[in-house]
Amino acid sequence: MVGRLFTLLHREIRGLHEAAYLLGVFAILSQILALIRDRLLAAHFGAGATLDTYYAAFRLPDFIFVSVASLVSLYVLIPFLSEIPEGQGEKQRAFLSRIVSFFTFLIIGASAIAFLLAPVLLRALFPGFDAAHFNELVLLTRILLLQPIFLGLSNIAASVTQLHGRFVLYAITPLFYNLGIIAGVLWLYPIFGIMGLGMGVVLGAMLHLGIQIPFIVRHKVFPRLTLSFNGTELRRLLALSIPRTIALSANQIALLALTGFASLQASGAITTFNFSFNLQSVPLSIIGISYSVAAFPTLARLFSSGVHQEFLAHITAAARHIIFWSTPAMVLCIVLRAQIVRVVLGSGQFNWEDTRLTAAALALFAISIVAQGLVLLFVRGFYAAGNTRTPLIVNSICSMLVIAFGFLFLNIFSTVPTFRFFMESLLRVEDLPRTGMLMLPIAYSLAAIVNVLALWTLFRRHFKGFQMQIARSFLESFATSMVMGFVAYECLTIFGRIFDLNQFLGIFAQGFFSGLLGIIAGTTLLWVLGNAEAREVKSALHKKFWKSRTLAAETPDPSTLIS
């Protein structure tokens, strides 16, 4: 009996890895297009006032999207749709009509209020903008207020496509979104100016929705607007979604505040913050989000079935592999930061000073990649157990800590010359302007580390017997990553003498071969140590993970999808 249970658990955990790798592949495809998008933006505008305006204009629409769309996210809707028996398409259509109507009235109302109050709200949020760029900020924000409407409707549509097993259809929607933005940069901006950038974003949001509409029409569940609502149904839906909505909104408030702080720095600070944030989001999306999303359905099923030891074993397995993959990603991001930034963004108007400052910010974000990935996992672990209150409280407090740390570090940086000199020397940016913005990624990373420590402690209290047997995994991963980083760092000097670092191919080759040799050294050490995670990775790859059943995604976080 014990052997059978062990076999079933082993099969569940192997399935976790296969699903996570498949989700990771889709994340890689999406992130590649997102990096192309950022490279085009960097090349056309550099780190200056135009992109500062562009990125700041997202913050208010992002907040509205998270605050309203997450109330009717597919995370919430799929259980409701699952209650409707198969073959009763008319009931599904009636339910969707009520939900779409409720969302549409709510989001249009919120967007209309934001449209009217935009000058007042934006002046309070971003006091550092001068008059000329502030007018552009108001105009662009008003255009982008269309985006949460289309993305929210797309999110509702995704609940239908996911329910019918069309997971790939939803997985490719971010690709179309980024294609819209790229079209805005290449074709609409030359015609309409900064309005064209906003129009490209709205086009991307429309494509995000439009790619799913034919499937919904074909299945005869296309909703209609109605004023007939079901009070009991809405109360159930809101009771489930409001805690998660508050937690997501708190994170957006933190990003709003950091963007506001950046607006008080020299021109280009907002752009540098967003570019570095986007770059650190690449490994987070591929590793942390993929594993946490892949784990969630099984965690929910195991907990609801009462097999709590298997539930804890599943959490432990996912945590071990998030650490296994994220730790070397963190180290390589720090060591190869300049090469990464220069290869991805270094063209056109994006100069060497912009590269150095963005690289320094990337290194500061990278120190919390492991923590951010584990936070995503623990939050879903609490959700799977039906506990939405704990992650709500912890995430809200830590979001406020982001703001407090940002304010504190900016003040220390500007008033304590010794601290400023130490940080600038450590990051090798002492001769650059706007270095004060580096305090913002420090604030974000420190709060993320506090967040994971709090969630880890509370998880152990809520789930007796949870010990997180990861000490050996962490030590092996950390040791391997240090060797990997050391080899990569030494190789940078060697390849720097071989390749022409004034050319794109030279910088790419220096970073690529340094990173490759570092990875080879780390992989060799893992083989010598007989690392358990490496064996599990090998097993999952042999099982052809790409043939696994893709899992449902969740409401996209606009901080990674958009900015």
Image: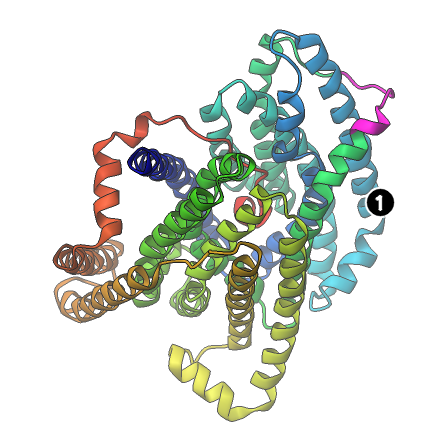
User: Eyeballing the image, is 83 above or below 47?
Assistant: above
The residue lying at 35 percent from left, 38 percent from top is: 9
* Horizontal relation, residue 558 to residue 66: left or right: left
Q: Position of residue 185 (x, y in %)?
A: 52, 42
Depth order, front residue of 376/412: 376
* Horizontal relation, residue 114 to residue 74: left or right: right
The residue lying at 85 percent from left, 23 percent from top is: 229
Q: Position of residue 89 (x, y in %)?
A: 66, 9
* Quadrant in the picture for residue 48: bottom right
- Asked whether residue 225 is drawn in magenta, I would say yes
Depth order, front residue of 74/475: 475
Residue extent of the magenta highlight? 224-233
Secondary structure predominantly adopted by residues drawn in magenta: loop
User: Eyeballing the image, is 264 above or below 290?
Assistant: below
The residue lying at 60 percent from left, 26 percent from top is: 159
Q: Residues within 10 Å of mark 1 (few under 14, many from 20)?
A: few
- Asked whether residue 558 is drawn in magenta, I would say no
Q: The N terminus appears in which quarter of the rendering? A: top left
* Quadrant in the picture for residue 423: bottom left
Residue that mark 1 sits on: 113
